Amino acid sequence: MNTATLNTKSSPRRILTAREAADYCGLPHHKFSIICRVAPIQFHGVQIRYDMRDLDEWLDGLKSGNPNGEDDIIWKLG
């Protein structure tokens, strides 16, 4: 019997596009920017991106019942 081994190298990306971030959070893309309280990152000359660690923190906050934490007032003020 022949066996094959597949060796793959993957380097997880920390910074995601809006669509990737929506997929990562399990949200429809068109609702993501409305629901998600994570501030995006703006790189010079590049569309906005989201930090996966920030998304994880926001999702963990949703699970604990504190989706915005101490920054809630800052979010509301814009």
Image: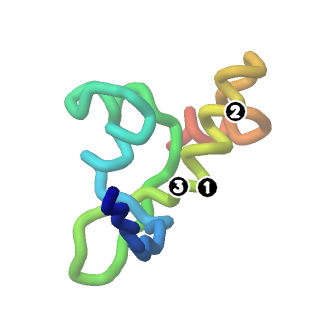
At mark 2, the secondary structure is: helix
- Return the disc, 2 or 1, that comes first in the chain's sequence: 1
Q: Which is nearer the eye, 19 or 45?
A: 19
Q: Marks 2 and 1, how far apart in space?
A: 10 Å
Amino acid type shown at disc 2? Asp
Q: Residue at x 33, y 56 (%)?
A: 1
Query: Would you place residue 64 above or below residue 6 in this image?
Result: above
Amino acid type shown at disc 1? Arg
Q: Marks 3 and 1, how far apart in space?
A: 4 Å
> Mark 2: few, some, or many residues within 10 Å (few <14, many ≥20)?
few
Q: Which is nearer the eye, 76 or 47?
A: 47
Q: Which mark is residue 53?
A: 1
Q: How many marks?
A: 3
Q: Kindly identify which residue carries mark 2.
A: 60
Query: Would you place residue 43 above or below residue 67 in this image?
Result: below
At mark 1, the secondary structure is: helix
At mark 3, the secondary structure is: helix
Residue 15, horizontal then vertical, whole percent:
43, 65
Q: Kindly identify which residue carries mark 3.
A: 52
The answer to which quarter of the image holds residue 16 is bottom left
